[in-house]
Image (spheres, grey):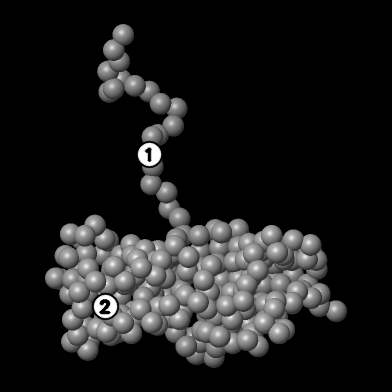
């Protein structure tokens, strides 16, 4: 018996669009020197290799065009793939650059960087938005609600989270990281090479912890004290996990 596809009935849809928080790091391109770009990219990746591993990225051409520089999109894409990243979108480009991206099957995205009407001494975010990468020069970023799987938060200074960090979430700071709830997911402090940075949390259940490029994964963390406030710091190029007295 042949069934008419139009008459089929399903208990659930075969496909649906879901609203979710998913942020992507943005690479601001400001030079037409491919060798220099590759060098800088490799230096950044070495600081947090697990965070950038197979990471999707968006290319921002605003600064490049502001300087009236030109760069082959094909060559740049090849370079980014070479270092292990995947370009999923572009923004800030000319109509020609955007059309070239579309022809290559790459999305053109809007500029959705988070802005805040707060003093630069601090930033408070009740709930992360679609673009969870903080790009101003604040010395402290304060998150007051849980960070869910797929979200990424970056602070140019210290990062304070007053809630839990979920599995699959990633938080990075150039300074210290404080998590006053359970820390799952990935936490990377001192990402610009600050060896004095520390990670503090109330309950350590992380997938990965890192300070200045030195990291441990969950298998290495097993056995650490849970449900107890701890601090993580570097000592002789090794991560130390210690309870807070």
- Mark 2 surroundings within 10 Å by alpha-carbon count, few (fewer than 14), some (14 through 19), many (20 or more): many
Which residue is found at the position 27% from the left and 84% from the top?
33
- Mark 1 surroundings within 10 Å by alpha-carbon count, few (fewer than 14), some (14 through 19), many (20 or more): few
Res. 101 mark: none
Numbered disc 2: secondary structure = loop
Where the C terminus falls, by quadrant?
bottom right
- Residue 174 appears anywhere in the view: no
Q: Extreme right residue here?
A: 245
Q: Position of residue 187 (x, y in %)?
A: 60, 71
Question: Which residue does the numbered mark 2 point to in the structure image?
Answer: 61
**Residue 2 versus residue 12: which sits nearer the camera?**
2
Numbered disc 1: secondary structure = loop
Question: Which residue does the numbered mark 1 point to in the structure image?
Answer: 15
Which residue is found at the position 79% from the left and 62% from the top?
223
Q: Position of residue 202 (x, y in %)?
A: 74, 70
* Displayed quadrant of residue 20: bottom left
* Displayed quadrant of residue 162: bottom right
Where the N terminus falls, by quadrant?
top left
Which residue is found at the position 56% from the left and 59% from the top?
168
**Residue 147 versus residue 194: which sits nearer the camera?**
194
- Residue 221 appears anywhere in the view: yes
State the CA–CA distance, disc 1 to disc 2: 34 Å
């Amino acid at each position: 018996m042949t069934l008419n596809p139009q008459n089929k009935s399903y208990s659930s849809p075969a496909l649906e669009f879901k609203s979710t928080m998913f942020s992507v790091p943005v690479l601001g391109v400001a030079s037409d020197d491919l060798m220099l770009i590759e060098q800088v990219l490799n230096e950044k990746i070495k600081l947090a290799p697990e965070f950038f591993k197979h990471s999707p990225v968006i290319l921002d051409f605003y600064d490049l065009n502001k300087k009236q520089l030109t760069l082959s999109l094909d060559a740049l894409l090849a370079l980014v793939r070479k270092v292990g990243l995947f370009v999923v979108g572009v923004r800030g480009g000319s109509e020609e650059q955007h059309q070239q991206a579309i022809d290559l099957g790459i999305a053109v995205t809007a500029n959705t960087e988070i802005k805040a009407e707060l003093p630069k001494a601090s930033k408070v975010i009740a709930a992360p938005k679609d673009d969870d990468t903080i790009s101003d020069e604040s010395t402290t970023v304060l998150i007051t609600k849980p960070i869910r799987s797929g979200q990424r938060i970056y602070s140019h200074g210290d990062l304070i989270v007053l809630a839990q960090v979920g599995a699959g979430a990633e938080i990075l700071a150039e300074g210290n990281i404080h998590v006053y709830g359970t820390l799952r997911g990935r936490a990377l402090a001192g990402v610009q090479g600050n060896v004095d940075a520390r990670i503090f949390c109330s309950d350590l259940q992380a997938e990965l912890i890192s300070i200045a490029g030195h990291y441990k994964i969950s298998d290495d963390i097993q056995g650490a004290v849970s449900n107890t406030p701890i601090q993580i710091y570097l000592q002789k190029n090794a991560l130390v996990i210690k309870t807070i007295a």
